[in-house]
Image (spheres, rainbow, N blue to C red):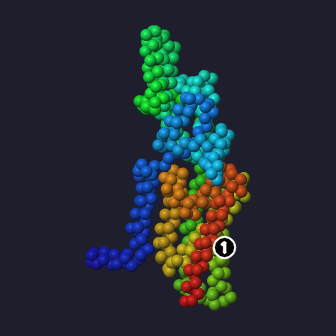
Amino acid sequence: MIAAIVRTAMVSLRRDRGALLLSFILPVVFFSIFAVIFGGRHDTTPKVTVLVVDEDRSRISQRLVQGLEREGALVVKTRPAPVKGAEQPEYTAPTAEAAVKAGTAPVALIIPHGFGASPISFGTAGADRPSIQLLEDSSDVVAPQMIVGLLEKVAMTSMPDQMAERGSKYLDQFVGGLTREQHDKLDQSLRYLRERQESGAAAPDSGNGGIIAVTARAVVGEDKNNPMVSFYAAAIGVMFLLFTASGAAGALLDEVENGTLDRVLSSRVTMTTLLLGKLTFNALLAFAQLVVMFLWGWAVFRLDFWSHIPGFVIMGVCTACAVAAFGMLLASVCRTRAQLGALSTLVILVMSSIGGSMFPRFLMPEAMQKAGLLTINAWAIDGFTKIFWRDEPVFHLWPQVLVLVGIAIVLFAIARRLARRWEYT
């Protein structure tokens, strides 16, 4: 009897292709996505982009910059990318700060004037020890810590002679000085280190830290009450909008099954009018959900909502139209509610995982970040981030608006084409 029950259940599962799809394909797809993100493969480990401004222009500061450029985990940029083939001027402190605010890089390093005169010290920063400024985007908690650690490493490997020279000064100051013979021997060692450095030979690594003074300052998110709430409101909100839109669009399949669609089309209502009406309703429903989500963030988590109303409305309407068209497309592709449930779950979860709704895209490998741009999630989250996180003006939203509106138009056109089958049945 047990064997018969098991056999019957297996036959039912095989006939329900949607359940079969969710049972086996979806876990494999999700495993593959997160294995790429967290698998630790060297070719998928995301590099940290850092903007470097060398105000000192000394031999020592240039050696430090060159050492940072040799680090495989960093992408060091001293100037913006060329525009129409023309090389751009090097970053300055103001332009580097503006670039971090715009999201070009999570971190910028400003090497101040006078750094080369006293680059190494084991005390606190002061008049005789200029401090390197680290400008950070506080939404990325990993990059600043990584940069500070690599900065210490590069200092030890690129400036060993400076470390030895500073150590001898401390020895003179606190121990009572060296003999003439010891000074001569130390000078000989310093000359050897400088010759090795000039020839490009690597210096031995060391485990000591705190040899370079670094002053960190958050230039993005420093005045936010609860800075990451806006990101998660957009990320989670868009994912559930997709589920809601696909579910609401499924009403079209219900009308097909119970014969309501035929009666509607026999009246003066055309298929185009019907689909536009359902698209409008689904878009309004999605926009209402976004409003509730962000109002809850304002009331409970102190999200700065009211000062960003224009940008929110623009991004909310565009996102709602895109997800509504996405739902209409899924409903037009599927034959039954069961197919719609299985397909929508698979597609939406995959889109959300690579589009940034489950894990921030800026922490993903570069290939995954580019793949995320194929999703509605990524463009919507980027737009809401510009508004609520970076406080950018509304006209900076034009790339996200164009893409989301374009997605809505294209998906609706495809859905309308696929819906022709109901007009001739």
Determine whether 290 is above or below 6 in the image. above
- Residue sitting farthest toward the top: 180
**Where in the figure is residue 86, as x and y percent of width and height?**
64, 49
Q: Residues within 10 Å of mark 1 (few under 14, many from 20)?
A: some
- Location of residue 136 (image quadrant): top right
SS under mark 1: helix
Determine whether 316 is above or below 62 in the image. below
Give the quarter of the figure containing the C terminus: bottom right
**Where in the figure is residue 95, as x and y percent of width and height?**
66, 42
Instruction: Say which of 394 and 116 sits in front.
Output: 116
| Residue under the image location 56 percent in, 85 percent down | 422
Residue 291 appears in view: no
Instruction: Say which of 89 and 420 sits in front.
Output: 89
Lateral position of residue 256 relative to residue 29, left or right: right
| Residue under the image location 58 percent in, 76 percent down | 414
Determine whether 413 is above or below 364 in the image. below
Instruction: Say which of 337 and 373 sits in front.
Output: 373
**Where in the figure is residue 352, as x and y percent of width and height?**
52, 61
Residue 418 appears in view: yes
Give the quarter of the figure containing the N terminus: bottom left
Instruction: Say which of 103 and 358 sits in front.
Output: 103
The mark total stands at 1
| Residue under the image location 48 percent in, 15 percent down | 171
| Residue under the image location 37 percent in, 76 percent down | 14
Q: Give the residue type that dot 1 points to.
A: Thr
- Location of residue 4 (image quadrant): bottom left
The residue singled out by tag 1 in the image is: 280
